[in-house]
Image: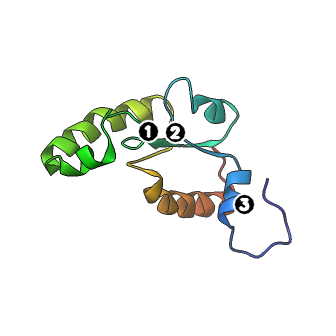
Amino acid sequence: MIYPGKSNRLSCSDLFRASTTSSVSAPKGVDGLNAGGWGVGLAISDNKVGVPLDEWDAMPENVQQKHRDRIYPTMYQRGAHYVIDSIADLMPCLDDIETRLKRGEKP
């Protein structure tokens, strides 16, 4: 829940109180979507590729992109509002969610 009377800038904790869930793997992550939350799919870091980070980092960019091309559409089909590689990429999503909440949008 976003509490009135706070500053005009929403904090991360405010946004998570507004029900943001990260990870849209089945069945994990669908709970937040079913509860009316914003869904952020973690395409690479949520074990969809199945390799450790050092192996991922060693992959050629074209191989990494092939994994993204396979995983991203699946996560959107499962209901994700956003899909990102890892939690490190979350802040732009939260900024966009903040903007959407200010416009009165709901997930």
The x and y percentages for residue 62 are 13, 46
Q: Residues within 10 Å of mark 2 (few under 14, many from 20)?
A: many
Front tag of 2 and 3: 2
- At x 21%, y 44%, the residue is 65
Q: Residues within 10 Å of mark 1 (few under 14, many from 20)?
A: some
Q: As shown in the figure, which amino acid type bears the numbered disc 1?
A: Asp
Mark found first going from the N terminus, 2 or 3: 3
Q: Residues within 10 Å of mark 3 (few under 14, many from 20)?
A: some
Q: Nearer the viewer, residue 5 or 71?
A: 71
- Indicate whether 11 appears above or below 64: below
Query: Distance of mark 1 from mark 2, alpha carbons?
Result: 7 Å
Residue identifier under label 3: 14
The x and y percentages for residue 78 are 48, 28
Front tag of 3 and 1: 1
Residue identifier under label 2: 23
- At x 24%, y 44%, the residue is 55
Mark found first going from the N terminus, 1 or 2: 2
Q: Which mark is residue 67?
A: none
Label 1 close to label 2 by CB (< 8 Å): yes
Q: Is 47 placed left or right of 14 in the picture?
A: left
- At x 68%, y 67%, the residue is 11
